[in-house]
């Protein structure tokens, strides 16, 4: 049997009800525009150093247990890998033994990987998170430690790794395409051919939404006046700096950094795997 469709006669809907739905739609559009203008204004006036300070303060405030996830919390950091992380390791890192992990946070991924038998060198740029990670590893009986590293940079190590992981969501926190590609090149120099790299990130569809366009337009108007490097469509504040990626952006940045994209998914959480090339 075919379902019955009810045709609504607009004239039969009370005027106040129609006004409500129209005003709700207008309010939501206005709110999105206002949020884009707010983000664009602050992306325009904040320097790279101030954006870093906001990021550090944001992750410091996750010590408040009312915030989820709490990257300083040992219970959270003992929870292990997410399903998509486990699946990616199984499919692309099966031949790896020694991993470098930057953006280690409070140690969740490092601990989980050590438990799986990997040899892991973890690094993090937030001093309080480094302390939390090392406290966690000591309590779990591991003699390895997470090292402190400069933001957006690979550690200066002479070790050659056969697997690279940029910690959960950390890649999208690196400001600007130029700095992200520089980081990928540094990591590529620590590896051999065929080495896999895992990135994870927020994503957007291929066509930029109006909000991203508005915020980028306003921010770059301000940045032209102050003679600062322009931001990219997809840059956002949530509330710290993040970049929302398209598949093409991920593929292009990996390529310029010395990797070939072999896997891209937005299931559960945006993530991609690249393979090191010549």
Image (cartoon, rainbow, N blue to C red):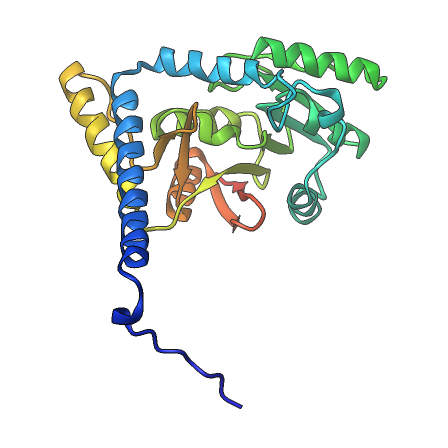
Up-down relation of residue 79 to residue 29 (above or below): above
Residue at the (29%, 21%) spot, across then down: 42
Q: Nearer the viewer, residue 203 or 116?
A: 203
- Pinpoint residue 195: horizontal percent, then vertical percent: 59, 38
* 55 vs 86: above or below: above
* The quadrant where residue 44 appears: top left
Residue 156 shows up from this direction? no
Give the residue at the far right of this rendering.
141
Q: Give the x, y percent position of residue 211.
A: 29, 40
Q: Residue at x 37, y 11 (%)?
A: 50
Residue 63, percent across and down? Answer: 62, 16
Q: Residue 192, position in %: x, y?
A: 58, 33
Is 244 placed left or right of 263 in the picture?
A: left
- Name the residue at 29% across, 58% down: 18
- Can residue 148 be seen? yes
At x 62% / y 21%, what residue is drawn?
105
Number of labels in the image equals 0
Closest to the observer, 187 or 53: 53
């Amino acid at each position: 049997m075919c379902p019955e469709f009810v045709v609504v006669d607009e004239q039969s809907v009370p005027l106040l009800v129609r006004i409500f739905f129209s005003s709700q739609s207008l309010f939501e559009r206005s709110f999105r525009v206002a949020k884009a203008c707010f983000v664009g204004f602050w992306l325009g006036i904040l320097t790279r150093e101030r954006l870093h300070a906001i990021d550090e303060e944001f992750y410091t405030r996750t010590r408040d247990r009312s915030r989820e996830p709490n990257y300083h919390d040992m219970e959270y950091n003992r929870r292990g890998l997410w399903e998509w992380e486990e699946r990616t390791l199984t499919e692309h890192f099966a031949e790896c033994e020694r991993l470098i992990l930057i953006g280690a946070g409070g140690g969740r991924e490092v601990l989980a990987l050590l438990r799986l038998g990997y040899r892991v060198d973890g690094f993090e740029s937030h001093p309080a998170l480094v302390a939390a990670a090392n406290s966690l590893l000591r309590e779990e009986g591991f003699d390895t430690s997470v090292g402190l590293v400069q933001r957006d940079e690979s550690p200066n190590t002479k070790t050659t790794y056969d697997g690279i992981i940029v910690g959960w969501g950390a890649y999208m926190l690196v400001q600007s395409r130029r700095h992200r590609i520089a980081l990928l090149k540094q990591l590529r120099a620590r590896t051999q051919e065929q080495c896999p790299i895992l990135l994870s990130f927020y994503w957007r569809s291929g066509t930029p939404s109006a909000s991203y366009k508005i915020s980028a337009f306003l921010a770059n108007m301000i940045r032209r006046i102050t003679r600062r490097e322009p931001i990219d469509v997809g840059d956002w504040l949530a509330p710290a700096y993040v970049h929302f990626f398209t598949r093409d952006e991920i593929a292009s940045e990996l390529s310029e950094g010395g990797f070939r994209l072999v896997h891209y998914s937005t299931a559960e959480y945006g993530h991609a795997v690249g393979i090191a090339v010549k």
